[in-house]
Amino acid sequence: MNRRKFLKNSSIAGGATAVAASTFPNPAISQSRKKWNVVSAFGKAGLLGQALEEFAKFVTSASDGKLTIKAYHAGELVKPFEAMDAVQSGAAQMGYGAPYYWAGKSDSISFVAAMPYGLTAQEQNAWLYYGKGIEQADKYAYNPLGLKFLPMGNSGNQMGGWYAKEINTVKDLNGLKFRMPGLGGEILKTFGVNVILLPGVEVLPALTSGAIDGTEWIGPAADMGKGLHKVVKNYYYPGWHEPATILDGFIDMNEWDNLDNNLKEIVKRGAAGTNLYILSRFQAINNNALQKLTKDHGVKLRSYSDELLKAIGNRAAEVLPQIASKSSDAKALYNEIVAIRESMLDWSTYAEAAFLEARKAANMRRI
C-alpha cells in the first residue's frame, strides 16, 4: 500500500521536565513558508512511526512546501512523555501521542483517548467527525492547554493484555504490577493493582526484568512486533479498558491560528487520512499476527472470566463519574461521550453485534 497516496486520497472531513527551546532546530519562516517540528511519543520503526512520517510528507507535498513538517520520534529530541511539554514551551510546533499520556495536565483529556466499556472505533469516528467530537475535545481538553487537537490514528479493538500468570478472579488482581495507562489503569488501582505508566520503548525491558508482571499494549500485530510473546505467554481478551483508542495530534494554538485556511485544510486532511490508515492497517494485519502468536509462538489465548468482566464493569460505572467530577471540563466531556454511547447502543447491538454472532453459522470457504 502506498501510504502517501492513501493519505492524499482520503476523503474524511476533516508533569515532565520542560524542554529548552534551544535544543530544537528553529522553524524557518520566509516568503510565507513555514517549517514545523513534530515530536512523537512513539518510536520510528513501528506502524505509528511510519504513519507520522507519511503525514509529514503528505502535508509538505500537498502544500507545495508552504508548510514543511519534520518528524522527530521518541527519544530523538525529547523523551516520549515530554512531547506535550515541548509544544507548550514553543520548542516544537506539533506533537503526537495518545491523549492519556498527558493526564497529568488535564482531568478531561484521558476521556478523549478511550473510555472503558465505551465506544468502538467506528463509534469514535462518528462522534469525532459527525458528533462534534473534535470541537468538544478542543473545548474541554486541548484549548485550555493552548493546543489544537486533531485525531491522528486509532488502534481499533485492543487486547486485554499479557500476564506472567493466569488471572481468573478479582483476588488475582491484588498486588499485580501492571502497565496500563489511561482510565483503565485508574479502575485497576481500585482492585489493588500497582499500575505503572511506561512509554512503549520501556515496556519490553520492564517485562523481561520482572519490574512488571504484565502489560497491555495494543493488539496482536503491534504486540508481536514489540516481542512481548517472548517473555510471557498468557494473552487475555477482550480489551475492556480500550475498546478503541484515539491517537492525538496537538498543535500550538498560535501556530495553528497563523495558518491560512488552505493550509489548515491540508493539515486536517492529512490527520484524517492518518487516522483512517492506522485503523485500517491494524485491522488488516491483526488476524494473521494472532494466528502466528498462537500457532507458532505458543501463546495461550485466554478470555477474562465473566466474574472479572462483571466486577470491572461495575467498578467502571462507579469510578469513571468520580474521575469526571474532578473538573467542570471533565464532567462536560464525560457526559458528551456517554450521550454518544447511549445514542449508538441499539444500532451497534442490532447491526454489528448481531451480525457478528450470526456470521459464525456461515461456514464460508475459498473455491
Image (cartoon, rainbow, N blue to C red):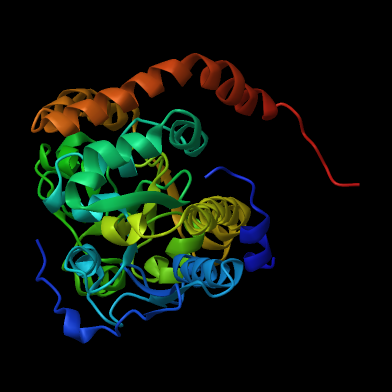
Q: What x and y, as percent, mark residue 9?
A: 68, 55
Please give the name of the residue rendered at 18% of the width and 59% of the height, measured from the top-left corner: 197
**Front in this rendered view, residue 163 or 48:** 48
Is any part of residue 241 visible from this angle?
Answer: no
Q: In this view, does 67 lie to the left or right of 90?
A: right
Quarter of the image for the N terminus: give it: bottom right
Q: What x and y, as percent, mark residue 313?
A: 27, 27
The quarter holding residue 352 reads: top right
**Front in this rendered view, residue 219 or 5:** 5
Please give the name of the residue rendered at 34% of the width and 30% of the height, measured from the top-left corner: 117
Please give the name of the residue rendered at 51% of the width and 66% of the height, measured from the top-left corner: 55
Q: What x and y, as percent, mark residue 164?
A: 27, 59
Q: Is residue 128 left or right of residue 197?
A: right
Does 157 appear above or below 56? Answer: above
Please give the name of the residue rendered at 22% of the width and 62% of the height, measured from the top-left corner: 84
Q: What x and y, as percent, mark residue 101?
A: 23, 56
Does 151 appear above or below 347? Answer: below
The quarter holding residue 239 reads: top left
Is any part of residue 267 visible from this angle?
Answer: yes
**Front in this rendered view, residue 201 or 40:** 40
**Front in this rendered view, residue 256 or 227:** 256
Does 170 appear above or below 278? Answer: above
Q: In this view, does 176 lie to the left or right of 356?
A: left
The quarter holding residue 19 reads: bottom left
